Image (cartoon, rainbow, N blue to C red):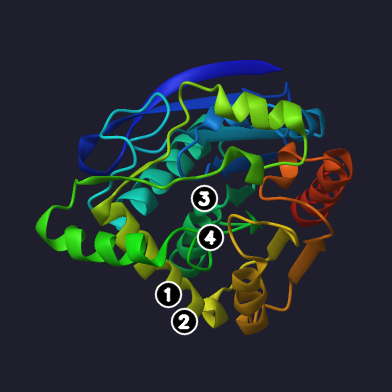
Amino acid sequence: MEEQEFTIAGAGGAQLFGQCWRPEQPHALVVLVHGFGEHSGRYSNLVPPLTAAGYAVYALDHRGHGRSPGQRGHIDSFDDYLADVRALIESAKAAQPGLPVVLFGHSMGGLIVLVYAIRSPAGLTGVVASAPMLSKPNVSPILLTVAQLLSRVAPSFALDTGLDPTTISRDPAEVARYASDPQVHAKSSARAGSELMKAVDWAQAHAGELAVPLLLYHGDDDKLVSIEGSRRFFASVQESDRQFVELPGRYHESHNDSGRDELFAMFVDWLNHHTVAG
């Protein structure tokens, strides 16, 4: 397997950190979109099963995250995330021409890939959403109201999300890894919070327009992003090739939780079926 780091130009010319993991002869591309406050390097449990099954994985660090520039947790517009993902997809396709492309996103990344797939389905073989942010996050309602007000008058004002690391996984080692990661942050600008909530509402209102195969999975004991948002979204999806898996007892990051090997096997089986691999 080959690992490579690179830089891509995102919306407004932002120079974003990217990385990829490529098996010798990949038969499809998985474009990985991480969640809020984290970075693409936190998927070290998920990447090996994908590359072992013949999938090249391409990822970036969102603006304001990880090794990419920008104020931590700040965006001017949700559309910037979509434009950045488009740039990543185009970069991956240029490096590996002619291969099927599947979008994968976790949490906020799940919201991003679902909105992207609804708006720009051309060229996508499928979309996989892990515990997508499809409902208001488990933070203070007062904080959400303040964020909406500040978004108009002080958009870059930073707020602490108060995320509890113990909500991400039942595995103490994974919780410790998250809590000690210097590239993880719990900051959100007022504008980012407002933009994300608007994107959640948009995704729920337009779920019926999704026209690519969908795999959606969510831990039913997720204390950070409610599974109810995923249930509501999936109930509105009209695409015939759709699958929703509720994972009993799992916390927010199923790929970093107990029982993840079973999840990875399901994910790879779905990919194989939809990319005619193997």
SS category of the residue bearing label 2: helix
Q: Where does label 3 land, which residue? A: 109
* Amino acid type assigned to the residue bearing label 3 in the image: Gly
Q: Nearer the viewer, mark 3 or mark 4?
A: 4
Of residues 236 and 247, the one nearer the viewer is: 247
Q: Position of residue 249 (x, y in %)?
A: 82, 55
Q: Secondary structure at mark 1?
A: helix
Q: Which residue is mark 1?
A: 201
Quadrant location, the N terminus = top right
Determine the residue located farthest toward the left in the rendered image. Answer: 153
Q: Tell me where residue 183 appears, x and y as whole percent.
A: 46, 25
Disc 4 or 2, which lies upstream in sequence?
4
Q: Residues within 10 Å of mark 1 (few under 14, many from 20)?
A: few
Q: CA distance from mark 2 to mark 3?
A: 18 Å
Q: CA distance from mark 4 to mark 2?
A: 14 Å
Name the image quarter holding residue 58: top right
Q: Amino acid at mark 1?
A: Asp
At label 4, the amino acid type is Met
